Structures are given as structure tokens and as C-alpha cells.
Amino acid sequence: MQFLIDFTWNHHIGLDIGKYDKFFRSRSLPEYRLIIINTNWHNSDEVPFSFAHEIGHIMNGDTGIRYYDSSTIRDKSEYQANLYGIGLLIDFCKSRDYEFDNAYNFCECFGIPASLEYIASLKLRGIM
């Protein structure tokens, strides 16, 4: 988590880390360059990836909340935020000389959903 906190600081991204309701989703408010992280999320294993994902929205230049966009635009920005978040966590691992023998273990360690394991696999192998 400290790596991600430092990243936000170094990139002039505001950060609100708190213990909210266990079903309050972490989110980014790109228009304010602000990320809100819920450390009380009902599945605490997912917090690191959620944090990295929200950083992705800011770094990708996403704007506003995507609730009312078409599914194509929403899905594209979510996919890109996932890519960025996974890449950021891989950068963290490389900076600390942490190695993973497979994408499953990497995803498990950072709370990355199983549906994104193929992306993690490609990125870990340097294909993506």
C-alpha cells in the first residue's frame, strides 16, 4: 500500500484513505484528481488492486463517473484502468525483486479478480 500511496503523492493525486461501510466501493474522481480508498472493503484482499485500478483511471485521463456512458465507453475505460493497475503492481514487484512463477499467484497476492488473470499472465511475460 505504501508504494501506491507514494505513487499518488509523486503524481499529485489527492488521496482519501478511510474505513467506510464494508460495501462502499473505492473510487476515483478524475475531475479533482482524487482517489477514495475504502480499507474496510468486505474483501480486504481486493484493496491493493482496487487502489491501483483507481490510480489507472486518473493516469489514463478518464473523466467523470461512467455510470451513464454507453457500455462500450465504460468497458473500455475499465479495461484500461485494469491494465494500468496490473502494470503498476508488476512495477512494484520488479522494484522489490519479487518474482511470481505464475499469474494465479500474482493475482491472489494483490486481490486481482480471476477474470483478469490472462492479462496478468501476458503482462508478467512482457507480452503486453
Image (cartoon, helix red, strand yellow):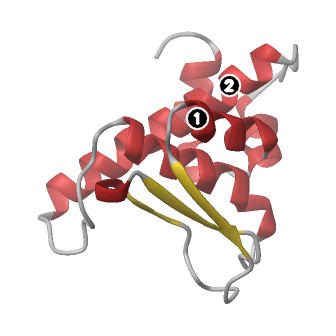
Q: Amino acid at mark 1?
A: Ile
Residue 107, position as x, y percentages in the image: 72, 42
Q: Image check: 47 left or right of 51?
A: right
Q: Image check: 31 left or right of 118?
A: left
Mark 1 to mark 2 CA distance (whole Å)? 6 Å
Q: Quadrant of residue 6?
A: top right
Residue 105, position as x, y percentages in the image: 82, 37
The structure residue drawn at horizontal position 75% and vertical position 72%, both measured from the top left corner, is 43
Residue 4, position as x, y percentages in the image: 69, 40
Foreground residue among 69 and 65: 65
- What count of labels does the image hold? 2
- The outermost residue toward the left is 70
Query: Cβ–Cβ below 8 Å for labels 1 and 2?
Result: yes
Q: Amino acid at mark 2?
A: Ile
- The outermost residue toward the bottom is 21
Local crowd at mark 2 within 10 Å, few (<14), some, or many (≥20)?
A: some
Q: Which mark is residue 33?
A: none
Q: Is residue 61 above or below residue 95?
A: below
Q: Is residue 77 above or below residue 10?
A: below
Q: Does residue 113 appear in this view?
A: no
Q: Which mark is residue 86?
A: 1
Q: Which mark is residue 90?
A: 2
Mark 1 lies on a secondary structure that is: helix
Residue 35, position as x, y percentages in the image: 51, 58
